[in-house]
Amino acid sequence: MTAPNSQTPNNEAPMSKVSVDESTVVLGIETSCDETAVAVVMGGTDVLSSVVASQLAEHARFGGVVPEIASRAHLEALPHVTAQAMQQANIDLSRVDAVAATVGPGLIGALLVGVSAAKATALALDVPFIGVNHLEAHLYAALLDEPNAKFPMLFGLVSGGHTLFVEMLDYDSYQVIGQTIDDAAGEAFDKVARFLGLSYPGGPAIDAAATRGNDKAINFPRAMLNDGLDVSFSGLKTSVINHVRANPSVSTDDVAASFQRAVVDVLVHKARRAARQINARTIALGGGVAANSLLRREMTLAGNTDGMEVVLPSREMCTDNAAMIASAGWYCLRRGEVSTLDAGANPNLKLGAGQR
């Protein structure tokens, strides 16, 4: 199966110039949302540099990401971030064998900044351009920290825009076996945090407030807990809002802790069920919500109980970064999948079955 990002077989692109091995260097660019990131990765797993410029301060006063501000900030930051990444990697641009960039999903204006820069760089260096699916890259982010993780693997991708359970048979073969039917877990965190008057971004704010609260104070619903592998968080969000409106003097910390506990209970329960169903040897997490302290703790305990290895990427690898883009680009290159220079961006790109 050809990946859904205008990739071409190796007999139609400059792929023939690249011998893909542990010395192959990929420059990765990530601009899908509100982080401008550039990284250099060698051999798919050796991170020579990873630089991220956050736009948090620009968006915080709006309580969320403003697309136009994000695009302009990427334009301003990308040249400096690229120079910093190359300096940290301590290599010359001439050493780069391919350039990878996120082509989706994400904010269209933000995506185009990175895609345009990557294609221009690839053209100037006469090396392949690789359009990377941001969601697929998250699968590789966890493996950057644990390259020897055992397959089959159950991967939980939990972020602001997506909640997916993915069966991975190896580095090049995966399929989605469960997902949210409405709000993503991170989206629920952000919306609840905003309603409670907590700071932006909502995930870390709820995580912090929960440490001061009682997570058994309010028994919020765990929708679809024993129903398949899909999840639903829209009703939980509504339940929080209704409870606070009916009990205006309720402790914000207790609400945050009880809400977080409900989300984590669902994610851990579904992950364990999915892992048993596919006979997984490993459970791995990725995406911004994977940085949540309670989720990391409970998933580790669940894995230990079930006799499975648990791979938790560093918090830097949970959030958006370009090391995962460069790593995914290396695996695409190894499969002979490169993109044409007329490839665009797809803000609604899905994670398909990676059977190749």
Image (spheres, rainbow, N blue to C red):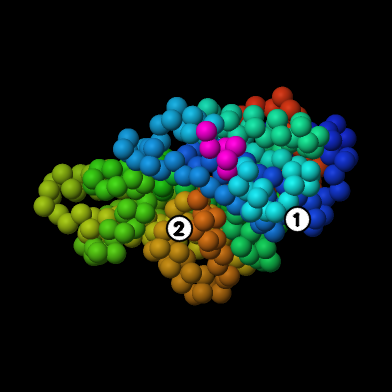
Image location of residue 60, percent across then percent down: 34, 40
Residue of label 2: 291
Image location of residue 151, percent across then percent down: 67, 63
Q: Amino acid at mark 2?
A: Ala
Q: Main secondary structure of the magenta part?
A: helix
Q: Is 311 placed left or right of 260 in the picture?
A: right
What secondary structure is marked by label 2? helix
Q: CA distance from mark 2 to mark 1?
A: 26 Å
Q: Is residue 198 magenta?
A: no
Specify start and end residues of the magenta stretch as a single range. 76-81
**Residue 123 seen in the current view:** yes
Image location of residue 216, percent across then percent down: 25, 64
Label 2 vs 1, first from the N-terminus: 1
Residue of label 1: 43
Q: Is 241 placed left or right of 11 in the picture?
A: left
Residue 183 to residue 152: above or below: above
Quarter of the figure with the N terminus: top right
